[in-house]
Image (cartoon, helix red, strand yellow):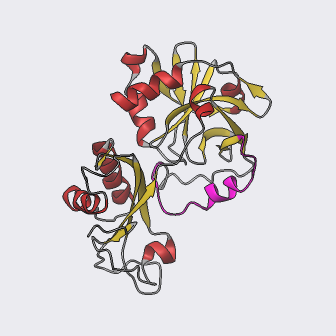
Amino acid sequence: MAHHHTSLINGSFDQTISAVDRGFTYGDGVFRTMRIRDGQPVSWPFHYQKLVADCAVIGIVCPSAELLMSDIQQLFPIDEFENREVSVAKIIITRGEGERGYAPPAVTIPTRVLIKSAMPTYADTHYVQGVRLHLCDTRLALQPQLAGIKHLNRLENILARMEWREESIFDGLMLDMHDNVIECTMSNIFARVGNHLYTPDLNLCGVAGITRQRILGLEKLLGLTCRVAPLTLPALLNADEVFICNSLYGAFQVTAIGNQTWEQQSLASTIRNILTHG
């Protein structure tokens, strides 16, 4: 009999999260979200490498790739009769259980959670015409020690996401305290100026997504020079082409930020094709 559970905790369908798990009490952990196609995580080497690196930043020993892969195979079994649609896996690694107080126990056993979800459905117009962004009032705080990692404290993103209700807006653009463009609430951002492709420097804040990393590796294929550099809002608004990216949808062109609009162009769909088939 197949399990229809949507989550696994430490490889088990019937384990629960402890009330003193530090991921719950302090957000002491990291996570990744990825597509699962035919029972396999798409871009797994990038995701696992980033999970290990993010865990290392906060001193958690990341579970092995073999262990996580066996979790994935349990939760996403390949059934020849099953419709092999793309679904979404979220892996959460916390430091594990702890007593009261911020100091982690001398020995902790990480908690690993795997959650299965349906792939979000994106409007056809997003693929064809692109997407609109809301310019968020919520600013990203600067914290170089946590910059780049996908940790469980996502309150800035939540506050930013609460700023708009319009269905016509796909994501929100977030700036830091110094007015630099950093990212969107659930996406990284790129701006093309001539044949240079810029993406914000994330050394002080922001999440360095794996799709951003993959796109930075496409320089030769795209015939563009990629640069990671600080990006101001005026520079972004004056760019020839802007697109956003993440592991689920790949890349979408940005057609509007506030009153600034862009003509429909092909870079995002070119990148999306390379990411999907590359």
Direction right: furthest residue:
259
Q: Residue at x 49, y 63 (%)?
A: 152
Closest to the observer, 9 or 105: 9
Question: Residue 159 colored magenta?
Answer: yes
- Up the image or down, 71 lies above or below 166; here it is below
Quarter of the image holding residue 14?
bottom left
Position of 126 compared to 260: left or right? left
Closest to the observer, 113 or 193: 113
Direction front: furthest residue:
81
- Up the image or down, 222 lies above or below 31; here it is above
Q: Where is residue 246 in the image (x, y as percent from the top left)?
A: 49, 41
| Magenta highlight: main SS | loop
Q: Residue at x 33, y 58 (%)?
A: 56
Q: Where is residue 47 in the image (x, y as percent from the top left)?
A: 34, 47
Label count reads: 0
Question: Residue 39 colored magenta?
Answer: no
Closest to the observer, 250 or 143: 250
Bounds of the magenta span?
A: 148-168
Position of 120 compared to 156: left or right? left
**Quadrant where the image shows the C terminus:** top left
Q: Can I make out residue 21 in this image?
A: yes
Q: Position of residue 144 (x, y in %)?
A: 51, 51
**Quadrant where the image shows the N terminus:** bottom left
Quarter of the image holding residue 109?
bottom left
Direction left: furthest residue:
66
Q: Can I make out residue 34 in this image?
A: no
Q: Residue at x 66, y 32 (%)?
A: 232
Q: Which residue is drawn at 30% across and 50% down?
A: 48
Q: Where is residue 159 in the image (x, y as percent from the top left)?
A: 68, 58
